[in-house]
Every structure is written in C-alpha cells, then in structure tokens.
Amino acid sequence: MTVETVHFPADVLPYTQRLTPDVGPGQILTEDGFSGAQSVVTFHGAERWRLEMAFADLTDDDRAEMSAFVTRLRVAHNVFLCVNHTAPQRGVLSGSPRALGSLSGQRLNVYNLTGNVASWARAGDFLSVNSQLKMVLEDAGTSAGGVASLYVWPPLYDIPNCNTVVHVSSPCGGFRMTRAVPFNTDPPGYRMNLVLTALERINSSFVSEVL
C-alpha cells in the first residue's frame, strides 16, 4: 500500500512542543557484575527524534485543517513533514549550502557557503537534508573556499549525494505518529484541543520532499 507524504499545516502553530533526542529500544547498556564496567551498543537508526506537539483552542479553519491532517496520516501509516518550531538559529548560515559528502555518520560536509566565516553554524542550530532533521553539535566555521564540516545529530541514516540541498532556513524532518489522536472539543463542535506524538521516520519507503 502506497505511503503518502503529508505536509504539516503551515499556518497552525503548536501551543507547546517537545523535541526529544532518543535512542529507543536500539541501545543496549550492560554492566559487568564484578567490576561495574559498562558496555554500550547503539544500533544504526536507533538515534532519532521524538516529537510531541499540543494544540489548544483550535477553531474554524485551524480546527478543520488539523482534523483533516491528523486523519489523513492514518496514524502511523503515512509520513508528515514538519518544520522545526524551535529557538532561532544562532549561526550566520549564509550562502546556499549543499552536501559535499560525509566523513562519517555524524560528520556532514557542506559547500557553496560564504568563505572565511568563523561561526557559520553554532551549536544548537538545526538543518535538514533529505528530510532528516539534524542538530549541529559544535560551532563550525568555513574555509576560504566556502566549505564547512558539521558535527550533527542524529547520525546520517544514509549519505546524501553530492550537491544535495541542505536546508538551514525552516529545516524540517519526516515523522510518523505513534498513536491515534482524539479530537477533544469543548463545547462539542467548537474549540478543539489535541496532542500529537510522533517518531522520526526511518525507512526506505519515504519520498523526500521538494521545499
């Protein structure tokens, strides 16, 4: 059955949002019974975002749009693309960044930037590539040639092709809802409240967006 990609309603803003870095069941921590020495195994794809958004007192167009959006997702079947509603970016983030390749799963090289910028990206900034939402973990400057090496989380689930667009303005990620959402209305048919919980999408059936 075809998986549909649905864009989150751009004009509806959450009342609250929680974006949680998570490892889910894909990380195993064991301890030696005598020395207490720890061993950690983290499986590829285990590190990903959890998202929770709450919406309060939705009426009229906002209520209708969110009702249709949530229903269209068919709980976890379809994927939605959501802009990261977070604090403003701190870095310069100038130029038109594109992927140059990756040194490792957590190191993304980008080019087509303004050259010789000390803080092109700052720790805590966000970007997205191939609909994967990434946080920059340490400050990064650019070389004279307009290239930067970014330390990101979650690790890349796949290496983007060279010249892939890297979004630093309104970065978004792909998510799937984790449970059905009740439409709570008070009074019935008027104000609607809802809470949406989701997990970052990781599978090959997802089709990247065109922003």
Image (spheres, rainbow, N blue to C red):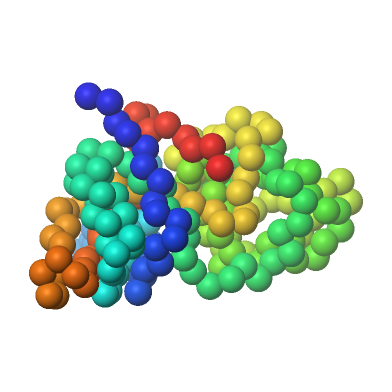
Image height of 36 relative to 210, above or below = below
190 or 16, which is in the foreground?
A: 190
Seen at 40% across and 67% down, the residue is 13
At x 54%, y 37%, the residue is: 210
Depth check: give the residue in front, 130 or 116: 130
Q: Quadrant of residue 110?
A: top right
Looking at the image, residue 149 sits to the left or right of residue 21; the answer is right
Going by the image, does 206 lie left or right of 193?
Answer: right
Q: Residue furthest left?
A: 188
Side (left or right) of 56 relative to 210: left
Q: Which quadrant would residue 16 be assigned to in this image?
A: bottom left
**Front in this rendered view, residue 96 or 43:** 96
Res. 132 visible in picture: yes
Residue 41 visible to the viewer: no
Q: Position of residue 160 (x, y in %)?
A: 57, 35
Q: Position of residue 171 (x, y in %)?
A: 54, 54
Q: Position of residue 2 (x, y in %)?
A: 27, 26
Q: From the viewer's perspective, is 207 left or right of 124?
A: left
> What's the residue at 29%, 64% (across, down)?
60
